[in-house]
């Protein structure tokens, strides 16, 4: 049992003994609308929208694992190494930066947008496998120039969807906390 799990179980016990205030917790402190600046102004609207590159071309782990993961620079370089380096007939400084990082063997320090606490476990594979669309949880990313968290990712949000009869998804505590 990890320290965070122990701590978490302690909190659950306290909550149960103490008469359970946390189910009614207002959505304060959740990261709704969080849209941090990124080191390179990568745009989903351009790539996944205008050019219709499929989500899984870049997020290739969503069907296979818990984590969707953000693509390695080499995926970008399929198009930007020799091919597309200019935009509107001009050398793009951002694509220049991408190439410099690649040649130096560095990666782009993307800022993570969505983040659950350690005690709650999410699994992409299960949801994508059950036919839940990316947009249901992440909004219309293919229209967004900057990624924004559109759902609060609260326990209530998860459980309310699991409860829908057509989803046939478990609401046992141990489904998400283990
Ligand atoms: C050409 C590659 C590419 C394609 C195609 C792409 N993405 Fe992304 N995606 C990225 C990169 C790079 C990031 C990290 C930078 C950022 O957050 O803008 C990212 C970030 C994200 C994030 C936020 C991750 C976090 O930090 O929490 C989500 C959610 C996401 N993409 C969903 C999608 C969906 C849904 C689609 C299809 C509609 C899609 N992406 C298509 C490259 C891509
Ligand atoms: C049922 C809701 C749901 C669906 C459907 C979903 N995601 Fe997510 N996504 C999440 C949650 C919750 C997180 C945060 C996970 C964490 O912090 O452990 C996340 C995180 C991500 C991240 C950040 C990296 C990671 O793995 O934590 C990317 C990229 C992403 N999602 C892309 C996608 C793409 C692409 C699809 C569709 C193929 C998709 N997601 C479908 C809820 C969802
Ligand atoms: C399948 C091909 C393809 C892939 C893969 C791809 N791009 Fe692009 N990218 C394009 C196209 C096409 C343009 C638009 C060029 C234009 O408008 O002339 C573009 C434009 C851009 C721009 C805009 C540059 C500017 O100065 O306006 C950035 C930044 C960018 N891409 C970053 C990335 C990153 C980061 C990745 C990897 C996560 C990536 N691209 C992966 C095809 C791709
Ligand atoms: C839009 C609806 C929806 C939302 C939102 C949602 N889920 Fe799910 N979840 C499902 C469906 C559908 C399944 C698949 C049920 C099945 O077929 O096993 C599932 C399955 C799971 C499983 C796998 C269960 C198992 O038996 O292994 C976990 C874990 C899980 N969800 C966690 C979460 C967490 C954590 C969140 C919130 C961060 C969340 N889910 C949000 C619909 C949703
Ligand atoms: C479908 C997934 C899911 C199920 C089922 C679930 N939880 Fe959660 N739980 C979450 C997520 C995601 C969070 C983190 C977000 C939040 O705090 O709302 C969380 C947070 C919590 C917290 C911390 C709240 C806080 O104030 O930080 C407690 C305590 C908790 N859950 C207890 C439970 C108990 C007890 C059960 C069973 C009755 C349960 N959970 C079932 C997903 C789930």
Image (spheres, rainbow, N blue to C red):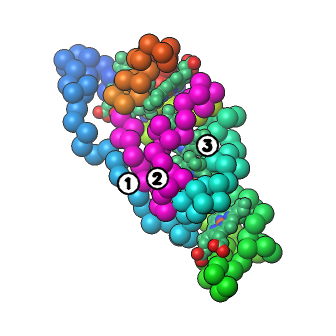
Reading the image, the residue beneath label 2 is: 113
Q: Residue at x 41, y 28 (%)?
A: 158
Asked if marks 2 and 1 touch (Cβ < 8 Å), the reply is yes
Q: Is mark 3 within 8 Å of ligand 2?
A: yes
Q: Is 140 on the left-hand or right-hand side of 54? A: left
Mark with earlier residue (2, 1): 1
In the rendered image, is residue 13 in sight?
yes
Q: Residue at x 45, y 45 (%)?
A: 139
Q: Quadrant of residue 151?
A: top left
Q: Is residue 48 magenta?
A: no
Pick whichever of labels 2 and 3 is earlier in the sequence.
3
Q: Residue at x 33, y 28 (%)?
A: 156
Q: Which residues are magenta?
A: 127-154
Residue receiving disc 1: 34
Q: Is residue 132 left or right of residue 10?
A: right
Label at residue 142:
none
Return the residue nearer the eye: 132 or 174.
132
Q: Residues within 10 Å of mark 1 (few under 14, many from 20)?
A: some
Q: Position of residue 58 (x, y in %)?
A: 68, 52
Per the image, the residue denoted by label 3 is 68
Predominant SS of the magenta segment: loop
Q: CA distance from mark 1 to mark 3?
A: 19 Å
Q: Which SS class for mark 3?
A: loop
Instruction: Tell me if the residue at label 2 has its CB under 8 Å from ligand 1.
Output: yes
Where is residue 21, by image quadrant?
top left
Q: Is residue 133 left or right of residue 71?
A: left
Say what secondary structure mark 2 lies in. Answer: loop
For the residues labelled 2 and 1, the Cα–Cα distance comes to 7 Å
């Amino acid at each position: 049992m990890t320290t965070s799990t122990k701590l978490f179980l302690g909190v659950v016990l306290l909550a149960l003994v103490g008469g359970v205030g946390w189910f009614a917790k207002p959505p304060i402190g959740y990261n709704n609308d969080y849209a941090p600046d990124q080191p390179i102004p990568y745009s989903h609207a351009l790539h996944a929208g205008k050019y219709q590159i499929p989500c899984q071309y870049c997020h290739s782990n969503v069907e296979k694992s818990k984590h969707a993961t953000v693509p390695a620079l080499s995926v970008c370089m399929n198009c930007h190494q020799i091919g597309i380096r200019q935009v509107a007939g001009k050398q793009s400084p951002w694509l220049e930066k991408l190439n410099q990082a690649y040649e130096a063997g560095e990666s782009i320090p993307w800022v993570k947008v969505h983040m659950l606490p350690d005690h709650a476990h999410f699994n992409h594979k299960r949801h994508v496998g059950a036919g839940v669309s990316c947009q249901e949880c992440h909004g219309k990313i293919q229209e967004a120039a900057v990624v924004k968290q559109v759902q609060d990712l609260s326990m209530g949000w998860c459980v309310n969807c699991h409860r829908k009869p057509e989803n046939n998804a478990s609401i046992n505590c141990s489904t998400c906390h283990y």
